Image (cartoon, grey):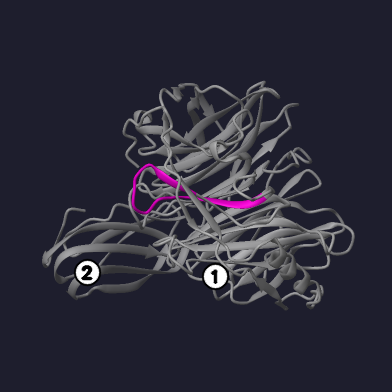
Amino acid sequence: MHLEAITMKKAIALLVLLLLTAGAASTAQILDAKTSGAHLSPEAGREVTVVPVEGQPHTLSAHSVPVEGAFRPLARPLNIPVADTDVDEYHPTLAAGGGRYLVAYTHAPSMMERNIMFAMSTDGGSSFADVASFDIEGVQDHPTLSHWGGSTFYGSFETLTEQGIQYLLEVADVDDISTWGLVYWDWSSYEWTDIHDLHMACHNSQESWEYGVISAIASTTYGDYDITNGPHMFFASPETDGSGYISWHDYSGCIHSTAAMDKPRDRMWTAYDIYNDTMGSYDLFYWSRDFTDPLAEGASSAAFIRENYNLLNPSIAAHNDRVAILCQTEMVGNQDISCYYSPDGGESWEVSTVAASGEDELHPAVALSGEKLVCTFIRGGNLYYAESDDWGATWSEPEQLNDEEGTVLSEDRSAAATPVGAIWSDTRDGNSDVYYRAFPVAVLNVEAISGGFGVKATVSNTGTAPAEDVPWSITLEGTVFLNSQVSGTISSLPAGASADIGTGLILGIGRVDITVEAGGAFETASGLVLGPLVLGL
């Protein structure tokens, strides 16, 4: 995103683009229809019945406003733990890409003194250093970060003192704080308030300012709506830099949101826990949308997953039409962790058990790491890790991550799972600090894509385990006559090693869009093909 100066008078262009044909009465009929459907039994691997949401979501656009002087550089060195001052640090999040691990967390001297701090690791999580903090007024909390591509990251956060404001952080170059920018959209002008529980997921396949998707919970009395804690998503305009959209369904009663990008399919995914008045319990509400043309007719689809018990605290991952939603389930009087997984983009679902002991398992978080799913959850004040090699059908035996017994803070967003490791709030020193631990996984990265005679890229493994039989592909979209799509397998890639891949000779002419994928890692580039030469990368 180019953060050109925009007038501070918040000139917002209102455009209502889509209206649902179903009103409140039809929504109630959908909920009632599901009540008579089959309830799920405890067996793992069973098929799940869902009810689709008819019609399209509502959408509204506005222009962003830049925040000048939003960041203050810092220079205090840190080793692991990530943050261990005498002041409480809460709600950490981490995004990894380009050999950088970027962390955001809440620095909280008091309930009304909360600010977002940033730390970074350049050595695979072995050490962290504070790099910046926000220098803006108000109370901020619950940051979210995602890697967009290259050295670019995006993020957001809640603002407790400006509850109708949606912020967007752009880290154009994570190594150069002068390129960091902050903008906001003032949705309070349209009667929105209490925007909270934001989660970001990025993808760089479209225009440079199209960051991906942010899920959120929000309330509004805009127009004829009366929504309290309803499901929302934010995304950038595909046409205009600086213009963004808020989109919503006419439902209320959500507590948590979660977001993911299916990069190969260019699809945004969000999920929410939502109260069902008829059943007296919480359902899962999932919502997906086309990233290439999010405003097109039929671009969005949504549905409910319903049990005869609560489904809470969802966390979602998606890749190549495979989708997994982890959540807390109350089946036998205590909280377990279940995984609802779909192999076909949400057309059908099954369910498996991640963890089900006699104790409460809480606050699940899932991420895609290469070709496997990794997750964390909290039990008895400890943080546990499990993984799945078959996209949620089966899970490994959970392993404890924290080395001090019972010190993990157990509350919403006190821990996060990432492709590279877990980050959490820990109370071992008498207050809440931030700790990190790497997962025992291979972490694959597609590094700089280069041209010349054909297309070349480097695949690196920055994780702690070797990668075996890594599938890779390079796809060129454009007028390419020879080797427009090349694939292969890296037989073995030890931790810390890298391997070069390439198309070999190509022939073509004109603009070309390039996609490189290796074991779940994904990177794109654009250039110009002149015969066998690829230029401008």
Mark carried by residue 478: 2
Q: Kindly indicate the quadrant of the structure image that contains residue 526.
A: bottom left
In the image, residue 60 lies in the stretch drawn in magenta: no
Answer few, some or many: residues within 10 Å of disc 2's Cα (few below 14, many 20 plus, some between 14 and 19).
some
- Region rendered in magenta: 230-245
The location of residue 80, given as percent across then percent down, is 57, 34
Residue nearer the viewer, 434 or 132: 132
- Name the residue type under label 1: Arg
Residue 226 or residue 185, whichever sits in front: 226
**Residue 381: x, y in percent?**
78, 43
From this viewpoint, which residue is outermost toward the right?
A: 333
Do we see residue 400 in this rendering?
A: no
Q: Nearer the viewer, mark 1 or mark 2?
A: 2
Q: Which residue is rendered at x = 63% and y = 34% of the image?
A: 434
The residue identified by callout 1 is 322
The Cα–Cα distance between marks 1 and 2, rounded to whole angstroms, is 27 Å
For mark 1, does the 10 Å Cα neighbourhood hold few (<14), some (14 to 19), or many (20 or more) residues? some
Task: From the image, give the main secondary structure of the stretch colored magenta.
Answer: strand
Where's residue 496, x and y in %?
Answer: 42, 51
